[in-house]
Image: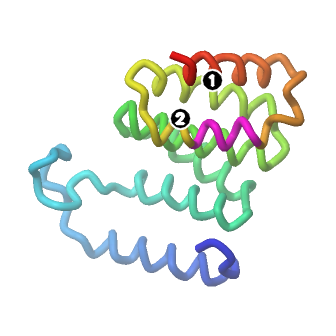
Amino acid sequence: MTGAAEKQIERVLDEAHGSLDQAAEPCGAATCTGPLGDGYTRDRLMVQSGICWREAKRPDKAVAVFRAHLSGSVLGPRDHAHYSAFLAGALAEAGEPDEAADAALRALAVAAPPRYGQVITELHRTAEILFPHRDRPAVREFHERLMVTVSC
């Protein structure tokens, strides 16, 4: 979706929603050995849509999608931290450094002990975006905690 026109992105996301509408209902909790797609829900599609909007340079839309679908989601801790890291980046790109740092700190708290690599990688990307705001207390705290995580 990177570089695509907004109308094209909306069309592809509409197609994804249509496909999900036509899919059979999940028959239970997602498992590693269960039927393919059992864990794929509307909330998962929506948070992945948030990633699309962020990558398409529309952090405002990404933030709105993440806020609407992460708060009450039933994602597991790793997935929630993963999408929260993308929310943090979108907030940073949208010019909300304090909110971005807060979201990043929450994601880091979940991701650091088990060392969830994808989450930490995305948080490094957010840290780069937030670097010009490093004098702000929340941003400074996020940078410091991220550096501790890296050095461990």
Instruction: Residue 33: give x, y in percent of width and height.
Output: 9, 49
Instruction: Residue 26: give x, y in percent of width and height.
Output: 19, 56
Residue range corresponding to the magenta coloring: 122-128
Q: Provide the secondary structure element on which disc 2 rests.
A: helix
Taking the spot 42% from the left edge, 18% from the top edge, the residue there is 113
Going by the numbered disc 1, the residue's amino acid type is Leu
Taking the spot 39% from the left edge, 30% from the top edge, the residue there is 77
* C-alpha separation, residue under disc 1 versus residue under disc 2: 8 Å
Helix, strand or loop for the magenta stretch, by majority: helix
Q: Is residue 90 magenta?
A: no
In depth, the one of 127 and 37 nearer the eye is: 127
Taking the spot 58% from the left edge, 64% from the top edge, the residue there is 52
Instruction: Residue 55: give x, y in percent of width and height.
Output: 64, 62
Mark 2 neighbour density, 10 Å: few (under 14) some (14–19) many (20 or more) = many
> Which of pointers 1 and 2 lies earlier in the amino acid sequence?
2
Q: Provide the secondary structure element on which disc 1 rests.
A: helix
CB contact under 8 Å: marks 1 and 2: yes
Rendered view: 31 above or below 101: below
Q: Quadrant of residue 59?
A: bottom right
Q: Is residue 69 left or right of residue 29?
A: right
Taking the spot 51% from the left edge, 79% from the top edge, the residue there is 12
Q: Is residue 70 left or right of residue 30?
A: right
Going by the numbered disc 2, the residue's amino acid type is Ile
Rendered view: 4 above or below 146: below
| Rendered image coloring scheme | rainbow
Q: Work out which quarter of the rendered image holds the N terminus and state it.
A: bottom right
Q: Specify the label residue 120 is tagged with.
A: 2
In the orientation shown, which residue stands out farthest toward the front?
151
Rendered view: 135 above or below 122: above
Question: Disc 1 marks which residue?
Answer: 146
In depth, the one of 143 and 48 nearer the eye is: 143
Instruction: Residue 14: give x, y in percent of width and height.
Output: 49, 76
